[in-house]
Image (spheres, helix red, strand yellow):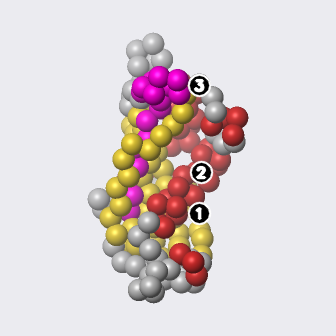
Amino acid sequence: MALDRTQFRFSTSLKVRNYEVDWQGIVHNAVYLLYFETARIAYLEEMGVKIDLEAIRRESQIVVARNEIDYRRPARFGEVLDIATRISFIRESSFAFEGIIDSGITGHRIAENVAIHVWLDQKMGKPVRVSREFRDSVHRYEGKKAVIQWPEDMA
């Protein structure tokens, strides 16, 4: 992937806990998904997007359609991780989060992530258009760093 850290406005930190480490003494590969998700939620809150059960239960829902991780080097118990995330694009019914995990001590790249999210109609289970409100929020926060497709009736 080779994501460029200078393109990321938002980051958060966390410390690797003992139960996240596997029998090899390194963070288990599945735990990185939780790290990236933790950063995505913090990012949305920073942007002012309401994250609660009422928002989650609305007519449309957002689901992860694809999650890709490139592992660069292992994280270990007690290590402080710097997790950066951003929305890099919005299309008709989907958008992408990109994420980077760097060691908070050495600065070495630990992992990179691209997660594609799709807006769905909850009743039909079919993709629906990403809302104007969400597009506007991302545009205000990311500016030109996010490629946002604006449907003609939203332009």
Q: Quick check: is 123 in the magenta stretch? A: yes
Magenta-colored stretch includes residue 20: no
Q: Which type of secondary structure does the marked residue at label 2 adopt? A: helix
User: Can residue 105 be seen from the camera position used here?
Assistant: no
Judging depth in this view, the residue of 77 and 121 nearest the camera is 121
Q: Residue 60 location, x and y as percent?
A: 55, 28
Badge 1 amino acid? Thr
Give the label on residue 12, or none.
Answer: 1
**CB-based contact (under 8 Å), mark 2 and mark 1:** no
Front residue of this view, candidates 62 and 86:
62
Of the numbered discs 2 and 1, the one sitting upstream in the chain is 1
Find disc 3 in the rendering and name its residue: 59
| 10 Å crowding of disc 2: few (<14), some (14-19), many (20+) | some
- Image position of 113 (left or right of 8): left
Mark nearer the viewer, 3 or 2: 3
Give how far across and how far down residue 24 sits, in percent: 41, 86
- Residue under the image location 53 percent in, 75 percent down: 20
Q: CA distance from mark 3 to mark 2?
A: 20 Å
Which secondary structure, mark 3? loop
Residue 10: quadrant of the picture: bottom right
The residue positioned farthest toward the top in the image shown: 153
* Depicted 27 relative to depicted 52: above or below: below
Residue sitting at x 59%, y 68% = 13
Query: What residue type is disc 2 on?
Result: Ile
Q: Position of residue 76 (x, y in %)?
A: 48, 83
Quarter of the image that includes the N terminus: bottom left
Return the residue at label 2: 41
Measure the C-alpha gap from mark 3 to mark 1.
30 Å
Identify the magenta region: 112-130
Question: Which-is-in-front pick, marks 3 and 1?
Answer: 3
Q: Residue at x 58, y 81 (%)?
A: 18
Which structural element holds mark 1?
strand
